[in-house]
Amino acid sequence: MGKIIFITILVMLLSCGGDSNNDPKTDPLQGLDAGNPDGKCSIPSDGGLEDISNPKTIVGDGTPESCTEQRFIDAVAKGGVIIFNCGDNPHTIKLSKPAKVFNNETPDIVIDGGGKITLSGGGETRILYMNTCDSNQVWTTPHCNNQDHPRLTVQNLTFIDGNSKNESEFDGGGAIWVRGGLFKVVNCRFFNNICASTGPDVGGGAIRVFDMYEDSPVYITNSTFGGSDGYGNVGSNGGAISSIGVSWRVVNSIFSYNHAIGNGGNPAQSGTPGGGSGGAIYNDGNYMKLSICGSKIEYNEVNSYGAAIFFVSNDHSGEIKLEDSIIKNNIGGSWHTLPGISMHSDTKTDISNSIIE
């Protein structure tokens, strides 16, 4: 294990700097902007913003009324670069069903909210879905779980009140569910998204991911999950994010006040429904890597294991890398190999310039 360097710092504010686009009269979430303002890690070349200079679809014609649910859903179905023109003020688009990516439309889908757009599930529905192995979304290769497209990017958006509890086949992922291709999140906020409350190996209050192309990582860059009491995401496991056999690269982001509310772990203990692991992050599978740089993971809560992070590599081949990050004040659970982190004792770790307590 690398050396853990404990440093003394002042308590950081949960707000992440002002956003000139957020009018307090129209955006009650002002002050909870995307990302960790104290995160100074460089952004990987594959983890930054995508070019939106040549959009395929502009949702809206300049008025809030023109930015409808159906126009957004239709835009996602067509793929390509999607931007919004909903007026000068922040605007929320409330969905009654998920927007779904079709695998045979365009190889790249970029959804950019310009820092003004909130996508809401209204507490009733998941918000966004991509699945290369779902025949309803069109199979495009004979190896659907390992293909290089679609490549989905969400950036400069807020996702609130997503709810996937009514999903039975592809459960978890209250706001976003992804399988196959490539996926990244840049400059986004996730508040009050929920998924199944109990069960082993189900979760991701905000995001659930499977099978990235050639084990490429999911990038989470300059983004916030929760950020303040009452805004956290909730699921059986992985209050914020959850995955099976997927690597993650988290940069300059915040995970706080998320909750894993299942009970009994995985496999479920006798007499329990299972779950309750990974207050912020739940990683399960074989080889995978969790890399966190310039980020804060605080005040997350569990019932079973991994108050901050649950990371179990079944074949003991996984790796955790923590750099310039803070993991502390996470609540509940047991089997913590490091404070707030549940993992096998032989899990490879590389930890530098970070607080873990």
Image (cartoon, helix red, strand yellow):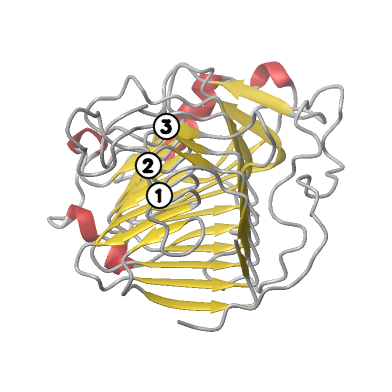
In this rendering, the label closer to the viewer, 3 or 2 = 2
Secondary element at tag 1 = loop
Near-viewer residue (194 or 18): 194
* Vertical comparison of 178 with 94: above or below: below
Distance between the Cα atoms at labels 1 and 3? 14 Å
Mark number displayed over residue 214: none
Residue at horizontal 31 percent and vertical 70 percent from the top: 318
Check disc 3 and report the residue beneath it: 261
Residue at horizontal 58 percent and vertical 78 percent from the top: 4
In this rendering, the label closer to the viewer, 1 or 3 = 1
Name the side, left or right, on which 282 lies relative to 122: left
Where is residue 140 shown, x and y percent of the image? Answer: 21, 50
**For the residue marked with disc 3, what is the amino acid?**
Ile
Check disc 2 and report the residue beneath it: 304
Check disc 1 and report the residue beneath it: 334
Near-viewer residue (250 or 63): 250
Q: Considering only order in the chain, which callout, 2 or 3, is on the residue closer to the N terminus? A: 3
Q: Quadrant of the N terminus?
A: bottom left
Q: Considering only order in the chain, which callout, 3 or 1, is on the residue closer to the N terminus? A: 3
Where is residue 268 shown, x and y percent of the image? Answer: 21, 38
Q: Residues within 10 Å of mark 3 (few under 14, many from 20)?
A: many
Callout count? 3
Name the side, left or right, on which 314 lies relative to 224: left
Q: Residues within 10 Å of mark 1 (few under 14, many from 20)?
A: some
**For the residue marked with disc 2, what is the amino acid?**
Ser
Q: Say whether marks 1 and 2 touch (CB < 8 Å).
A: yes
Secondary element at tag 3 = loop
Near-viewer residue (324 or 120): 324
Residue at horizontal 19 percent and vertical 45 percent from the top: 139
Q: Quadrant of residue 201?
A: top left
